[in-house]
Amino acid sequence: MNYTHLSDEALLFLIARAQPQALQELYERYNRLVFSLALGLVGDRALAEEITLDVFTKVWDRGETYRADRAKVKSWLTTIARNQAIDMLRRRRIRLDGHSLGWEQLASLPGDSHLQPEDETERSLRRERVRAAVRQLPPDQQKTLALAYFSGYSHRQIAEALDQPLGTVKTRLRLALQKLRQILHDEGLE
């Protein structure tokens, strides 16, 4: 049977019926996504590899729990990966801010190589202005914003990671976005 032409949902159906080739195909499709997400959350390649293996082990063990009416397979896998990463961080007592992507590290992210030099320069200046605006926010808002937009955490996951009430997290994000909007508007960037 050729598994490459099957949908993600069909693969999970077969995984739930103990078809290892289906798991192999799902792994081929999504292992890089899961690894990248895990690496972004924990900041350590070895831990990210371990999390990736844990995710696909869970898929093998619990493939029958997947519900297509609740989420796409890709979303289901990323949710499992996020939860595994958070659990790993808790178990190893690693502080999130020590391994998350920071605002200053954004400068080192590669740009689009297809842009003209003038466009790349403009984009670089715009990124620096946004980083400068973010630096004007209180540290708690900066951390919450980074977890939401650069680590991909949900509001509930941020609340758990920071040990804060969900309402506090939502308020911090709302206030941070309002302040950023105002700062960028005042600088003519909005």
Image: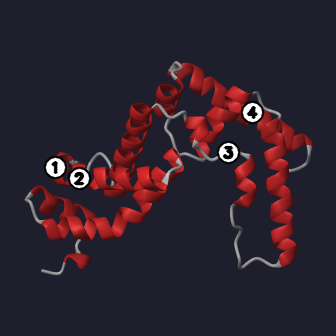
Asked if disc 1 and disc 3 are in contact, CB closer than 8 Å, the reply is no
> Which disc, if any, is residue 57?
2
Q: Write the residue at 50% across / 29% down.
A: 161
C-alpha span from label 2 to label 4: 42 Å
Asked if disc 2 and disc 1 are in contact, CB closer than 8 Å, the reply is yes
The image shows residue 78, relative to residue 1, as above or below, that is above
Q: Where is residue 117 drawn, in percent x and y? A: 84, 77
Q: Write the residue at 51% across / 40% down.
A: 153
The residue indicated by pointer 3 is: 102
Nearest to N terminus: mark 2 or mark 4: 2
C-alpha span from label 4 to label 3: 20 Å
Nearest to N terminus: mark 4 or mark 3: 3
The image shows residue 76, relative to residue 169, as above or below, that is below
Q: Amino acid at mark 4?
A: Gln
Task: State left or right for residue 105 relative to residue 8.
Answer: right
Q: Amino acid at mark 3?
A: Gly
Q: Nearer the viewer, mark 2 or mark 4?
A: 2
The residue indicated by pointer 1 is: 61
Q: Write the residue at 40% across / 57% down.
A: 34
